[in-house]
Image (spheres, grey):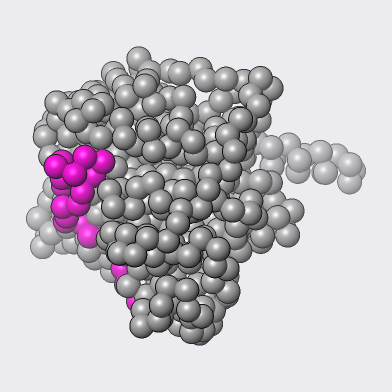
Amino acid sequence: MLATLALAFTAAVAGVNAIPTISAKGSKFFTSDGGQFYVKGVAYQLVPDDPLITTSQCSADAALMKTIGKNSIRVYHVDPKGKHDDCMKAFADAGVYIWLDLDTFNTQIYEGAPQWNSTQRDEFAKVMDAFHSYENLAGFFVGNEAITTANGSVTAPYIKAAARDLKAYRDSKGYRKIPIGYSAADIAGLRPMLQNYLACGNTSEALDFFSLNSYSWCGKSSYQQSGYDQLEKNSEDLHIPIFMSETGCNVVKPRDFKDQEAIFGEMADTWSGSIVYEWIEEANNYGIVKYGDKVDPASPSAPPDGFPRSGTPIPVQPDFSNLANVWKTLNPTGVKASAYNPSQSPIKCPAFTASAWEVNPTAALPTLGQVHDFNSSPTSTQSSSSSTKPTGTQGSGSSVPEPAKGAADNLGRNLKGVGALMAGVLAVFAWM
């Protein structure tokens, strides 16, 4: 009897996620069945606190995602106390992996007050605990756009300290080697120092992958005009995977998503795909799906921004079909894990450069409880406080797009959200 129950339990658990797992090897991702994995995804945050708890909504969205060949979603915020089995199964059944941010609205690493403390670590760990067992959990982010200005490099050691401690926690718990990385704003002045710093050094401290939020390919651009050729050049020697964690400039409408042809074409030997911003249509006009027409926010039971956030997903045209049609033509096969022997040497840590990259490459990473002292020299010992939390909202953003530089300095992006979610999203949180 007990043996029968044990088998039934094992079958039930396996039924939640019957999908190959993702791991990092050298500069590439691979599935557990040996094929190279390219991220082909869309940012997915219908509601601010957790979009992975309403089974009917996840099932409806997953079914539509499957029709356009999407294999990934990026989720920025979840409630680790929520029940996620059914939503994760719905996405797994559709062949969709989740790339998940570990931070919350009040635990993110923030360049206005760089720090890393036990409160942040423990809250990040709760998210890892809640999601590590799902086979379609592809990777974790320890931050999203924690650095948004060219003089924000002093924040980088705190990002790396978070990766160090979460990798150590993952391994101490015996979890599978789920890749842990970071999602960076595309800041020309920090290229390629930020990616190289976060990837260099001891493997116990370095990121497992690096990703970039880039909106420099706008309208009828090109590989050279957009600056994608420079992104490719800067990453050729990187020994960990790199991909676009947000892309899809909407300055020119409709979007034709031709940048995907470069990412899965000229860049496919180095880059591992992209995540398009975003699934739901809201005030920033980046959505490829809506759940009904916008309503008067003052009407009864209306969401505060007027954009419905649940129901039957309706493609926003022609953007939805444009993306589907482009993706149908882009299916790089890559290399088999068994035939791949990484040849890149670990990238060197960038040198300290005043007013450009103000991080000492030989300095120890921040300890738990450390807070950056802006009045000290870059190599000075910093102050400590294990109870202080980040005070900014960076990494959550605003629902109103804001300008920023992309890969080509003369090309702005009408910046998105989460990055672009925060103002409208916090209002939605209050409404819910």
Q: Residue at x 19, y 30 (%)?
A: 225
- Quadrant housing residue 342: top right
Report the front residue among 162 and 358.
358
Q: How many marks?
A: 0
**Residue 345 screen position, x and y as percent:** 59, 38
Compared with residue 345, is residue 64 higher up or lower down, i.e. above or below?
Answer: above
412 relative position to 16: left or right: left
**Residue 416 screen position, x and y as percent:** 23, 49
Q: Residue at x 89, y 46 (%)?
A: 2
User: Can you see residue 356?
Assistant: yes
Report the front residue among 270 and 30.
270
**Residue 388 screen position, x and y as percent:** 45, 82
Compared with residue 386, is residue 75 higher up or lower down, i.e. above or below?
Answer: above
The stretch drawn in magenta includes residue 62: no
The stretch drawn in magenta includes residue 408: yes
Which residues make up the magenta segment? 391-415
Compared with residue 165, is residue 187 higher up or lower down, i.e. above or below?
Answer: above
- Quadrant housing residue 136: top right
Report the front residue among 136 and 174.
174
Task: Name the magenta segment's main secondary structure.
Answer: loop
**Residue 150 screen position, x and y as percent:** 28, 59
216 relative position to 392: left or right: left
Q: Residue at x 45, y 18 (%)?
A: 332
